[in-house]
Image (cartoon, rainbow, N blue to C red):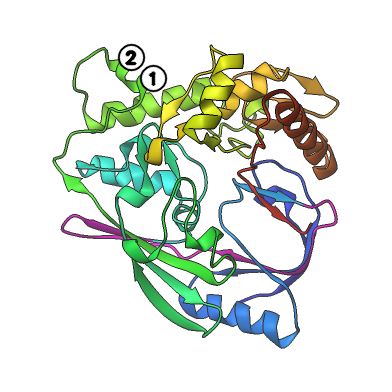
Amino acid sequence: MIIRENVPLAPFTTLGVGGAARYFAEAATEAEALEGVEFARSRNLSLFVLGGGSNVVIADAGFAGLVLKIAIAGISRRDAIFTAGAGCDWDALVAQTVDAGCAGLECLSGIPGTVGGTPVQNVGAYGQDVSETIVEVRALDLQSLAIKTMVNAECGFAYRSSLFNTTERGRYIILQVSFALRPGGEPTLRYADLEKYFAGRTPTLSEVRNAVREIRHSKAMLLVPGEEDARSAGSFFKNPVVTQAAFEALSNKFPQMPNYPVVDSARKIPAAWLVEHAGFTKGFTKGAVGISRKHALAIVNRGGATTADIVALQDEIRARVRDKFGIELQPEPVFVGF
């Protein structure tokens, strides 16, 4: 494994901002992942594990330790189980499962990033979450330096979270993920946009994949080279979940506020609605940063932005939403080097 020094990180991210890594390495095997960890420890360096760079905000000062990019490749299938290396492109895996006629990931088409990032945030979209299909996660335990295989129930999956980004944040490096799919199964049509798209008919898996990618493209949530509105970290804020009592108080003030039921009688409120109704409409621009012209949740780099510009706009949006609705928006990306 080659250890490089002072490597700019912005080109490894979809936002295109941030400084350099003091040290940088790519791990193409499990052994190289361990080698990278041992290198960092031997020099008392901080360690950051990078995947596809689609959900990170790198500080302008960069990262003073080792950035270890996980590049473990390979996709295999055993019956209904698909296993992919953490460095595999996520959408390539989804395409392969759809081509094989296996249902379970089709609504997650077009999401940027790598396989290793999906269990961390329990990635989901258009009516599916990866936690519905993940059967095993293979990971390097940074406490013991042993490789551990965890089944679904051990991963602590919840809405956009898992033990990997909550109670055990920073403990594990994801190496491989296995998904149990449904050969010959029908696609999932739980999401209003998809139901409307197909107008009551049952589409094929391939048709759902194409529709999801088309919808994501229409919202600038599909990475397209040269498209300014796609120069983002995707949805910048999580959809807040509030108690039933809190929702009722809010709905008395804002009767048009959309909402969706979740577990324990709580309600989920679309963060995009909150952002727009706090005054940050699609296409909002402030210097080198702004809001996507197609999706209110995407903070975009309009060209030449710094991380400080991104963070300042994030802070302004959160403050305005807090003042108007009493809701604290939580950012979705990982902040590195802060």
Q: Is residue 241 left or right of residue 13?
A: left
Give me the residue at 44% from left, 50% from top. 122
Q: Position of residue 48 (x, y in %)?
A: 66, 66
Q: Disc 1 vs disc 2: Cβ atoms closer than 8 Å?
A: yes
Decide: is 158 above or below 303: below
The residue type indicated by label 2 comes to Lys
Q: Which residue is mark 2?
A: 196
Q: Is label 1 in a helix, a strand or a loop?
A: helix
Residue 73 is one of the magenta-drawn residues: yes
Closer to the camera, 150 or 180?
150
The residue sitting at 36% across, 20% down in the picture is 192
Q: Which mark is residue 193?
A: 1
| Picture quarter with the C terminus | bottom right
Left or right of 265? Residue 28 is: right
The quadrant of the image that shows the N terminus is bottom right
User: Considering the numbered disc 2 on the image, is that residue within a helix, a strand or a loop?
Assistant: helix
Type of amino acid at the residue the image marks with label 1 = Asp
Quick check: can you spot residue 116?
A: yes
Q: Report the residue at 68% width, 84% height from top.
A: 41
Please provide the residue range marked out in magenta.
Answer: 59-84
Q: Is residue 168 magenta?
A: no
Place residue 203 in its image quadrant: top left
Q: Is residue 132 left or right of residue 183?
A: right
The crowd level at tag 1 (other Cα within 10 Å; few <14, some 14-19, many 20+) is some
The dominant secondary structure in magenta is strand
Q: How many marks?
A: 2
| 195, above or below 212, in the image | above
